Amino acid sequence: MDVRLPDGTVIKGVPDGTTRADIVAKLKGNGMAVPAEWLAPTPAAVSTGSAIRDIPRQVGLTARYGLEGLGQAVDPFTEPLRRMVVNPIARSVGLPEARPVSEEASRLATLVGLPQPQGANERVIGDAARMVAGAGGLAGAAGAAGRATAGTTQNVLQTLAANPGTQVAGAAGAGLSGGSVREAGGSPVEQVIASLAGGIAGGASTQMGQKMAEAAKRAMTPKTVQMQRADQQIQLVLERSGVDWSQVPERIKSGLRQEVADAMDTGGELNPDAIRRLLVFRRAGVTPTVGQLTQDPGQITREANLAKTGANSTDANLQRLPALQNANTASLLRQLDAAGAETAPNAAGAGQAAIESLTGTVNANRQNINSLYSAARDTNGRSALLDGHAWTMNANRALDDANVGSFLPPDIAKKMNAIAAGEYPLTVDVAEQLKTSIGNIQRGSADGNVRRALGIVRAALDEAPLQGAPTVNPGNLPAVAGTVPPSPQVLGTESLRAFNDARSANRSWMQRVEANPALQAVVDGVEPDQFVQRFIVGKGASAADVGRLRNELTPEAAQGIKTYLVRHLKDAATNSTEDVTKFSNAAYRKALRDIGEDKLRAFFTREELQHLTDLGDAAKYMQAQPAGAAVNNSNSGALLLGRGLDVLDRIANNVPIGRDVIKGWVQGAQQTQVLDSRNALQLVTNQKAPPPRLNPLLAAIAASPVQARQDDRRK
């Protein structure tokens, strides 16, 4: 177009849409005079009026941009069909070729009278608006189509429709960047590169803004609320694993709450297995790595090989991971020592203490029984007569009723017959002798019928009545104090009661001994070196037997057994190697299982037993190499790499930057793996890939052939 200056000068060939400001800048750049009225500021009223008058034009431009943007969004799908199918057919039959959809959209906008952009600013804004319209339309169409499809097609469409806000922001950035480069004279390649960069930056800025908003929201959340949320999450996770969060000591709870709250602050999904393992490590008092918490085979591989690399280097700064492994193992051993292993007796010492404790129990009960029998034998009623006839009659009737009379041993039957015939009297003393004989035969017989027959005779003997006492004063003469002897019945009853008490004490004691194999062994005689193995640790010892044994021990003897059990577990973990820092989780946990939780509960509290279990579980996670891990157990590669780092370090001594890079790379990896538990507490596996910041088709839209031709026309 031609522009006439106020002084009448005409400037020809000015591009359409050039503003007065553009002309003023051009005149100044060429050293030409600028009309004074063009330099005068525009009154505010005039500017406002011009802006109001320009509203319809801007609305029309927006409509044009939207129409053209939708056309450009369709081009990547329709252009191959137009070029390869439609136009060849049209040429073959002599018809005009079809134009691109975007070009038709632009022609339609012109046909309906929509304004065209003028000047560089409107053209760049137009580029951005078209891209926004195309991206929004494409996202909406992809979302609608995705709901009507399935399988791979649905996944692709859902990806294209994901995060529409980010897509629109990326489209705006792409349009502004590409258009600006074009207006600056950039080539088509430069325009495409700028569009892609601008789209990525726009999408990234949107996501960054969202993250900043989320972070600000979390920062505004009171600390108490954060801790409550963390506590609820931990409790929910542990309940599913059968762990009672309320039973965890508060000193451990507080630290775990903070770690989980920090992980929640990042906005990611929590890893319940990692939280459960972290509790084990905290209760065990050792420091985990990320791989040990997640049990991810790739992470464990990197950590293990990195530790070997550092261990093979002479630089102490590169040895933090192997040092951590050693410190954790030493901590497990120290805790076993603190639990009693350090001061525990050996197997023979623990067995001897238990035997001495049980021997004291045996001697005390024997002394009590002997005293009761001695007192019974000292009673004056031992010669009191029992009704032998009544006893034998009742016994024989009961034997016949039970049909076991033929099983009665001949010796007992012969004595019963002699007493029934009056050949010798049945006194309290004779009855006690018979009861002793019957008891001995019962214990020595394996025949159930014999034992039953003897039991019937014994029961009848217990019920045998005393004979009536003879008349002491037939004439009922006045009695003189101190001259009337006690009734034989009274004396006999007292004697029977004394023998029954002694016999009852002996019976209770024998039942107690028979129910406790360890006590029976002490009664029969046992060696101390095998006592703990036979009656506590070994598989032949039941939990019930161990519980009864524990109840018979003195507190000192029970403490000796308890500390020996801890020493037994430590010996299993170290293979009885006291001066080497090593801990076999497999051997330790096997020893723990072989003893059994039920038996250990007889000597340890619930908290103590949980701690012993946690030590084994922590060691298990520390030493695990799950399926898929590729740890270099041979150490050869780590040895070479470690030596190589030493060589590089010596070479880099005179190049501080190089040396820092070498050391920083290893140290940074170590810090990341070891110290940042949030990386483990977040669930990072089996997640869908994040939606793209920039719709992948925007690049095709920005670089489409139609877009290139439009760009050429705008230069």
Image (tube, rainbow, N blue to C red):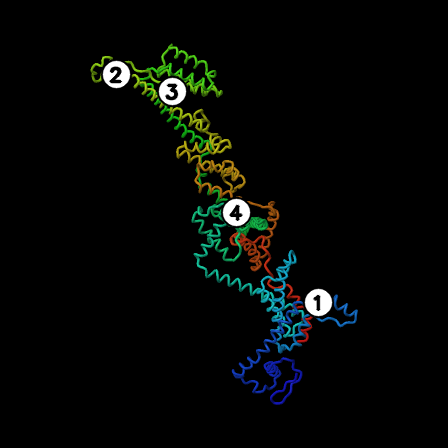
- Tag 4–tag 3 contact (CB < 8 Å): no
Select label 2 or label 4 by which is in front: 2
Q: Earlier in the sequence, mark 3 or mark 1?
A: 1
Asked if one can make out residue 287 in the rendered structure from this viewpoint, the answer is no
Q: Amino acid at mark 4?
A: Gln
Total labels drawn: 4
Asked if residue 259 can be seen in this view, the reply is: yes
Among the two numbered marks 2 and 4 on one chain, the one whose residue lies closer to the N terminus: 4
Which residue lies under the disc numbered 2? 485
In front: 473, or 587?
Answer: 473
The CA distance from mark 3 to mark 2 is 26 Å
Q: Residue at x 21, y 14 (%)?
A: 477
Residue holding disc 4: 325
4 or 1: mark nearer the eye: 1
Q: Which residue is mark 1?
A: 79
Towards the viewer: 88 or 502: 88
Marks 3, 2: nearer the viewer: 3
Disc ID at residue 132: none
What kind of element bears circle 2? loop
Three-letter code, disc 1: Glu
Q: Residues within 10 Å of mark 2 (few under 14, many from 20)?
A: few
Helix, strand or loop at mark 4: helix
Q: Position of residue 378 (x, y in %)?
A: 32, 19
Q: Name the quadrant containing residue 425.
A: top left
- Measure the C-alpha gap from mark 4 to mark 3: 73 Å
Residue at position x 38%, y 26% from top?
A: 365
